[in-house]
Amino acid sequence: MRKTALILAAGQGTRMKSETPKVLHKVCGRSMLKHVLDAAEGSGAEQNVVVVGHGADEVIEKTGAPGLTFVHQKQQLGTGHAVLMAEHVLPEEGLVLVLCGDTPLITKETLKEFITYHEEAENSVSVLTAIFEEPYGYGRIVKDPEGRLLKIVEEKDADPEEKKIKEINSGMYCFDAASLKANLKKITNDNAQGEYYLTDLIEIAVKQEEKTGAYPVKNREEIMGVNTRVQLAAAEGIMRKRINEKHMLAGVGMVDPEAVYIETDVEIGKDTLIYPGAILSGKTIIGEGCVIGQNCRIENSVIGEGTEVQSSTIIDSKVGKDTSIGPYAYLRPKSSIGNDVKIGDFVEVKNASIGDGSKASHLSYIGDADVGKDVNIGCGVVFVNYDGVNKFRSTVEDEAFIGSNSNLVAPVHVEKRGYVAAGTTITRKVAEGTLVVGRPKERVIQGWGERKMKEKKEKKNVK
Ligand code: UD1
Ligand code: CA
């Protein structure tokens, strides 16, 4: 059967106290709306429609994808009205799955089960429900003594008896498309909130003797709606746990999973061990057998197998195999580090490539450079890439040796096996295999220490 998912996302989300439309707030690096869309797609929906209203342009801009349809609801007159706005894009037949854009924890597995239930029961409408000990605020599922679904009543319209009902409406439904289209127009706004309630479709269907049913969700977490930043953080906590468990079950080690922060799209190879405080975000891919040490932040980067990263920040970069990064290294965007490389403490790399087997063990800045293989970059080396106006690029060829505390004033070229003596400032090409020493000659002054000592003593005696 053809399946269409319709996601309601026009509401403002006032309680988030934010300039950002509610459904664009992120849970583990992905917007709530995107999470819902992914679950819908994963459950087999071929067509996805999103109803947008508040912040529509931003929502469309940030969520737009091929095959995704947006419809506008200019005024938020209720959930029934929201669906009515999409009526013209819904199919004549098949199944319509209605979801909310602010329930990021819903899973494709649950939606699949729900759809199967709906199809097997041959219902015209099915509601995904949950049993809540504290049902306040939710629509209540009203059933007859035989347990047949009769209607959904909103908190504000419920009588004292109905308020005691603990089965609540998740806001997710399966509809037979033809029945939905036919009945939508029958919804009125004759209720406590003066809104067009989508939930009225249950009673309408029941009155027409169409088959309806309620399907309780197995894991209540999944229908949690996010209205405040407190709930957003709670949803993030649940999602984080799911993500970490998925990785651990796939062979990734975590010393303390509660202190590891991995976004949705991150991939990690097996036998990689992750220490507390690691934040892995964006489209990061970590190879097998790596060690990601404490307090590492790795964003949109690829780390090769067997590499060890300690207390470092890596952004939009690539690191090869069996390499060692940190502690306290900073790889800024467009850095490409080879295999068997060492980038040690307090080394900053930016928009630079470093070939296999090279080393920058401590305290250097390598910006805008192409460094070859087996190069040694000594302690305190600076690639002077900026003249105050322009940035320039430098090249250091294979097996070169850049002595400690040297400056390479870009653009400069150190040829193969070129040596730069410690403390040298290079402004010109270093030819293949040559040594350049560019430091002032030392002077030797005999007896200096003795003299200073004497001066000090005399000063003291005067006091
Ligand atoms: C709705 C249900 C309630 C259910 C609850 C679950 C109705 C009448 N009530 O109530 O039974 O227990 O969800 O969370 O449906 N939206 C629009 N346009 C509108 C109004 C809402 O797009 O005009 C969207 C919102 O952005 C949101 C979703 O629909 O994503 C639900 O709206 P919300 O106002 O949160 O519904 P509730 O009053 O909580
Ligand atoms: Ca409401």
Image: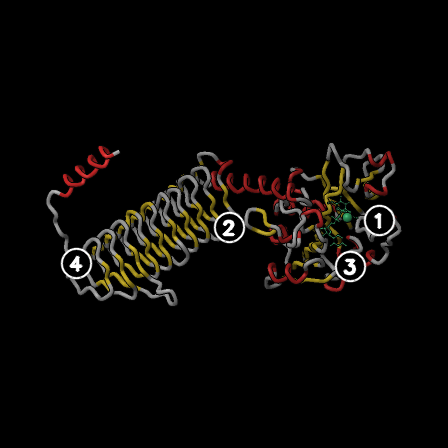
| Disc on res. 437 | 4
Determine the CA span between mark 4 and mark 3: 75 Å
Image side of residue 459 versus residue 15, left or right? left
Q: Which residue is mark 1?
A: 193
Q: Residue furthest front?
A: 462
Image side of residue 92 versus residue 111, left or right? right
Q: Which residue is mark 2?
A: 265
Kindly indicate whether the residue at mark 1 contacts the one at mark 3 (C-beta within 8 angstroms): no
Judged by depth in the image, the label closer to the viewer, 4 or 3, is: 4
Rendered residue at 20%/34% (across/down) = 457
In the picture shown, does residue 162 fall above or below 300?
A: above
Judged by depth in the image, the label closer to the viewer, 3 or 2, is: 3
Q: Position of residue 37 (x, y in %)?
A: 62, 53
Q: Toward which corner of the image does residue 255 lie, by quadrant?
A: top left
Q: Secondary structure at mark 3?
A: loop
Kindly indicate whether the residue at mark 2 contacts the one at mark 4 (C-beta within 8 angstroms): no
Determine the CA span between mark 4 and mark 1: 83 Å
Which amino acid is tagged 4? Val
Which amino acid is tagged 3? Gln
Image side of residue 328 versus residue 413, left or right? right
Determine the CA span between mark 3 and mark 2: 35 Å
Judged by depth in the image, the label closer to the viewer, 2 or 1, is: 1
Labels 4 and 3: the sequence-earlier one:
3
Q: Which residue is mark 3?
A: 75
